[in-house]
Image (cartoon, rainbow, N blue to C red):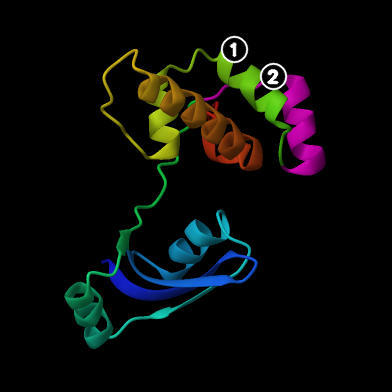
Amino acid sequence: MKKYFNVSFQYSESVYCANIAHAESAEAVEAHYSAKYEWCKVSEATAADVEEAKRKGKPIVEIDPAPKMPILTINQQEREALEKSGEWCPAMARECMNRNGLNFDDIEDINNHYETHRWGSDTDRRYRKSAVAKAVAKVAANPRDYIRRTA
């Protein structure tokens, strides 16, 4: 069951921010904020903290667990790189994703983020470009989460 958490994080060199996050665990909140910011601190929020945030219009961030779907079949070179370093370079991740024929729905599933921009608009092109880059970075950092298990 989801809980509320207080989150403090370093937005820039001299700017610190605080949010309330709604997630399954403190670890999920920490993983979410650590991926974006250099420093973060997470603690469980009280009912009064949540009520105050709602009253003052402060952000309450919903954090869903990232879907981990086995979608990639890897070759020997990728397997060796994974065993040696535990991750891939972005170029290897992109090549593996291309070889496996991932479509944009798969990219959005990896990012757990879906948009409805008008297809072909400048906003849509920018979104797609950044979504692909984020998905490649996620797969490169944790390829084991996306590898299809074989019998």
Q: Kindly report the secondary structure that dominates the magenta region of the rendered protein.
A: helix
Q: At 78% across and 22% down in the image, what residue appears?
A: 77
Label at residue 99: 1
Q: At 56% across and 30% down in the image, what residue appears?
A: 133
Q: Is residue 109 left or right of residue 2?
A: right
Is residue 77 shown in magenta? yes
Label at residue 75: 2
Q: Nearer the viewer, residue 111 or 15?
A: 15
**Residue 65 picture location, percent across and down:** 39, 52
Quarter assignment of residue 59: bottom left
Query: Circle 2: is it few (<14), some (14-19), or many (20+) Cα within 10 Å?
Result: few
Is residue 37 shown in magenta? no
Magenta-colored span: 72-86
Q: At 40% across and 68% down in the image, what residue appears?
A: 25
Q: CA distance from mark 2 to mark 1?
A: 10 Å
Instruction: Give the quadrant of the C terminus.
Output: top right
Instruction: Inspect the image, locate mark 1, and give the three-letter code of the amino acid beneath it.
Output: Arg
* SS class, disc 1: helix
Q: At 60% across and 36% down in the image, what residue appears?
A: 137
